Every structure is written in structure tokens, then in C-alpha cells.
Image (cartoon, grey):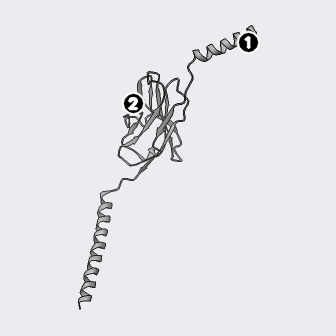
Amino acid sequence: CLKLEYLKTLVLLSLTATKPSLAIDIYADSEVIVQNGTIGILRCTFKSYEVVGSTTSVTWSFQSSHPDNQYSNAPYVVLLGKEYAGLDEFKDRVQFIGDINKRDVSIQLSPTQFSDNGTFFCDVKNPPDIKGTPARTELRVVLKESSNTLVIVGSISGALFLLVLIAAVVCIAMRML
């Protein structure tokens, strides 16, 4: 009976002496569409019951959607309060624009390139809140519309409007005769 009391006390002490690990919730836009050569903003926020501190870490990783370029790397990392740009593919193009104290760990990618098409993963660890699923954002970089396209569309629309106007005038003139 003494062993049982000793065991209960030991279990009770171990439960109260250690902090439980809680889940962290991470949120991001499911899809972002940007034109080639423009700024792409990848938003990511998190919910944690712990205060953000020097042990809080953020990792953005990338999985390319190009069949000949199926690499995965970390374009951006925040670790121990320091920011690190990732590999050359993203060097000088990625910038942290969030505020980690406000639980915003968004990044900006500029200028976007077609090789950026793929899935970006945002992962946050805020010990002891380390259990969580990284948020994912599908980035789609599309062709930038040229100014010629707008001129052509405007010209065709104007011509169609003019034809409808002429047809209406002819109909009114025919009824008057």
C-alpha cells in the first residue's frame, strides 16, 4: 500500500512539474494568384496559447509544381529571433512582412516568377506548442496581360457597340418610312 501511495505521488508530481504540449493552429490562404513579375503576398497567421518568445520558429517551405523541378526547400526561416533567407532560388526575392508578436508570419515574394508555381507551406513552432499541421498555400503565377491585349479587346468592344448602334438607327429609320 505504501508503494501505491508512492507511485500516486510520483505520477502527480510528474504531471504538475511538466508543462503539457498544446496544439498550435496555423492559417493561410488556400490559393494566391499573381501575375508574373509582380509582388506575391503569402499570408500566414497562427494561434498559440503560449507567449511568443525567442524560441518561436517559423519555416516556410516550397514544393514546385513543375515536373522537371520537383524540389522542396525553405525560402524563409525565422529561428531564435533571427531571420534567414533561404536558397538562391528565393534569395533577394523573399521578405518577411508579418509581425511575429501579433502572430502574423506572412512573407512577400517579389518579383514573382513562373518557377514559383507550386505549394508553399507555413510551419510555426512556439514551444511548448509544437504540434500542428503546416498551413499550405497554392501559388499560381500567371502571364501578365500586355497592354496590346487591352487595346484589342477595347477596339472589338467599341466596334460591336458601333454596329449595334447603326443597326438600331437603321431599324428606327425603316419604321419611319
Residue 110, position in %: x, y? Answer: 36, 41
32 on left or right of 17: left
Give the crowd class for mark 2: few <14, some 14-19, many >=20 residues within 10 Å.
Answer: few
* Label drawn at residue 128: none
Task: Tell me the amino acid under the disc marked 2.
Answer: Lys
Looking at the rendered structure, the secondary structure element under dot 1 is helix
Residue 29, position in %: x, y? Answer: 45, 43
Task: Tell me the amino acid under the disc marked 1.
Answer: Leu
* Residue under the image location 51 percent in, 23 percent down: 127
Tell me where residue 147 sits by quadrant.
bottom left
Q: Quadrant of the N terminus?
A: top right
Circle 1 sits on which residue? 4
24 on left or right of 90: right
* Residue under the image location 24 percent in, 86 percent down: 173
Q: CA distance from mark 2 to mark 1?
A: 47 Å
Looking at the rendered structure, the secondary structure element under dot 2 is helix
Q: Residue furthest right?
A: 1
Depth check, mark 2 against mark 1: the one in front is 1
* Residue under the image location 68 percent in, 14 percent down: 8
Q: Residue furthest top?
A: 2
Circle 2 sits on which residue? 102
Front position in the image: 174 or 79:
174
